[in-house]
Amino acid sequence: MDINEHEHVIEVTDLRRVYGGGFEAVRGVSFSVRRGEVFALLGTNGAGKTSTVELLEGLAEPAGGRVRVLGHDPFAERAAVRPRTGVMLQEGGFPSELTVAETARMWAGCVSGARSPLEVLGLVGLAGKTRVRVKQLSGGERRRLDLALALLGDPEVLFLDEPTTGLDAEGRRDTWELVRALRDDGTTVLLTTHYLEEAEDLADRLAILHEGRIAAAGTPAEVTAAQPSRITFELPDGYFLGDLPPLGELGVSGHETEGRSVRLRTHRLQWAATRLLVWAEQAGVELRRLDVRSASLEEAFLGIAREAAETAGTKEYAA
Ligand SMILES: Nc1ncnc2c1ncn2[C@@H]1O[C@H](COP(=O)(O)OP(=O)(O)OP(=O)(O)O)[C@@H](O)[C@H]1O
């Protein structure tokens, strides 16, 4: 596939979704996805991930804002967009009495220029299950069948809503490999996930949603870089926090202690760790259970969710 990496295949501007009863699930979301990128939408339960993805899939009309997929409005111009996209919903609904092969053949009949059903079943590791009835598949196997069906039309853009939920560790890794191979072939992938490791491993860029708004966005490295790294250790008996060099000099922006355990937060990890170790060496102190680590996406996610909840609490209090 000829890839123009600068082309924005998905463009979302100030998107809003309001459900009956007036609940605003998506409150002004903007982002874009370039051709050949894997973009992950993360967020706590009810953050608005599925509500957003459904608007991109053209399943509903936005209450406000604008969506463009491959240059078209996916709701108003469904006929232009749908054949070029693959969709894996959070819950696929198949007739449970059909076999895996029958399901894939039936689906292929609805897709123009469909790939061979057996080929896509092979891609997702279901080649050995073609004669099994859908109702007999495990939850993870059903997710794989969902993915196979989304791939039948050889889509330019793939929407995957929690593609690895219910998969065991090996199945999850296999799916990641498949998504990477699709990306390398030029497919643009937008996925939602609750697995932060999945987003860290797979996504070129991501956005963290909280209560219908984007709380953070960027590459996984950019999103984690905004969070402080941490150093934890235990001080030996007879030593206290006040015995350490002044925390400001160590570049420490925050700290907690519990008994002998100390946790320091810093945006200057190498600087702080070096000064701390030099002090310990010179003072002849052994820092037990020493652990020095950069922020992970999980910490960033939890930090952002905590911050957003505190801000909401402050607002409620102020109101
Ligand atoms: N049809 C509906 N009518 C009213 N409210 C809805 C409807 N569908 C979703 N919601 C609400 O909109 C909010 C966002 O839901 P959504 O399913 O988009 O979240 P999500 O981020 O995908 O969550 P999860 O991770 O749990 O799948 C939730 O508060 C949900 O209860």
Image (spheres, rainbow, N blue to C red):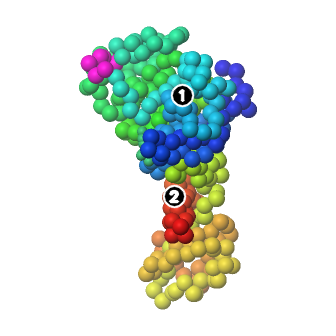
The stretch in magenta equals: 95-101
The disc labelled 2 sits on which kind of residue? Ala
Q: If the image is split into quadrants, where does the N terminus sit?
A: top right
Q: Are circles 1 and 2 on residues that touch, CB within 8 Å?
A: no
Note whether residue 95 is visible. yes
The disc labelled 1 sits on which kind of residue? Gly
Q: Which residue is drawn at 59% across and 53% down?
A: 215
Expressed as whole percent of the image width and height from the top left, the position of residue 40 reads 55, 41
Residue 305, which numbered label? 2
> Which quarter of the picture shows residue 245?
bottom right
Is residue 24 or residue 136 the one in the foreground?
Answer: 24
Outermost residue to the front: 21
Expressed as whole percent of the image width and height from the top left, the position of residue 284 reads 57, 83
Residue 58, which numbered label? 1
Earlier in the chain: of badge 1 and badge 2, it is 1
Q: Residue at x 53, y 40 (%)?
A: 17
